[in-house]
Image (spheres, rainbow, N blue to C red):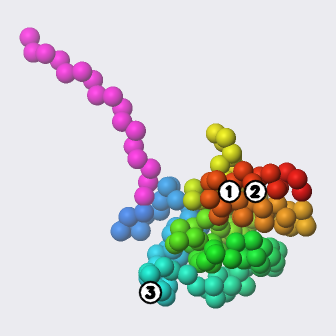
């Protein structure tokens, strides 16, 4: 008698994707696909400096100016806070969002609430930010409004994000004293 082959296990089908035929995707939302298209366009059209770094403050300011009034006010204030707290960060667009980079690597970014139709804006930090605090720490903050206390905390976070690992403890101590 012939050996029977083991029954095949049911395989998990991959999520739907956008194809050349124009079918819709279940992997990314329309807003996420638009952000990816914006990023690709940014890379194609952005002026490059002698070092190849992409950075253009005027594009960031134009993007902030195009935001809805609540997001615009918050974006303008964050731009000023980040610029004052870490003048060595270069403003640039990143996936269609205002971002701030050090040595060409994004350290923090502002995501307007309207970007992904959320109920709050977000100030996020990348893995390049030195916010490490034990084994777990926040990397994004929901923003509905900015108070003076919030602005002081954001300033401290940005300073800490761009500081060297050895300087992190002194920034934490300064923040705790205030």
Question: How many other residues sit within 10 Å of disc 2, few (<14), some (14-19) or many (≥20)?
Answer: some
Q: Is residue 141 left or right of residue 45?
A: right
Residues at marks 3 and 1 touching, judged by CB atoms closer than 8 Å: no
In depth, the one of 18 and 2 nearer the eye is 18
Judged by depth in the image, the label closer to the viewer, 2 or 3, is 2
Identify the image quadrant of the N terminus.
Answer: top left
Q: Which residue is mark 3?
A: 50
Locate residue 143, reporting x and y percent.
79, 62
Q: Secondary structure at mark 3?
A: loop
Residue 163 location, quadrant: bottom right
Locate residue 149, reporting x and y percent.
90, 62
Q: Confirm whether residue 105 shows in the render.
A: yes
Total marks drawn? 3
In depth, the one of 164 and 79 nearer the eye is 164
Identify the image quadrant of the C terminus.
Answer: bottom right
Q: Confirm whether residue 119 shows in the render.
A: no
Q: Secondary structure at mark 1?
A: helix
Q: Which residue is mark 2?
A: 171
In magenta, the rendered stretch is: 1-17
Identity of the residue drawn at 42% across and 58% down: 17
Locate residue 140, reporting x and y percent.
69, 56
């Amino acid at each position: 008698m012939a050996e029977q082959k083991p029954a095949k296990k049911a395989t998990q089908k991959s999520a739907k994707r956008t194809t050349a035929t124009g079918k819709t995707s279940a992997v990314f939302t329309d807003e996420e696909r638009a952000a990816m298209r914006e990023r690709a366009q940014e890379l194609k059209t952005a002026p490059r400096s002698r070092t190849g770094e992409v950075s253009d403050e005027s594009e960031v300011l134009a993007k902030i100016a195009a935001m809805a009034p609540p997001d615009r006010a918050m974006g303008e204030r964050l731009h000023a806070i980040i610029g004052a707290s870490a003048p060595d960060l270069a403003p640039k667009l990143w996936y269609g969002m205002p971002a701030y980079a050090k040595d060409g690597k994004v350290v923090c970014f502002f995501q307007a609430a309207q970007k992904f139709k959320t109920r709050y804006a977000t100030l996020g930090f990348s893995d390049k930010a030195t916010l490490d605090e034990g084994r777990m720490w926040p990397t994004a903050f929901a923003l509905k409004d900015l108070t003076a206390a919030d602005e002081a905390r954001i300033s401290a976070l940005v300073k800490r994000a761009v500081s060297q690992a050895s300087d992190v403890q002194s920034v934490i101590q300064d923040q705790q004293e205030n």
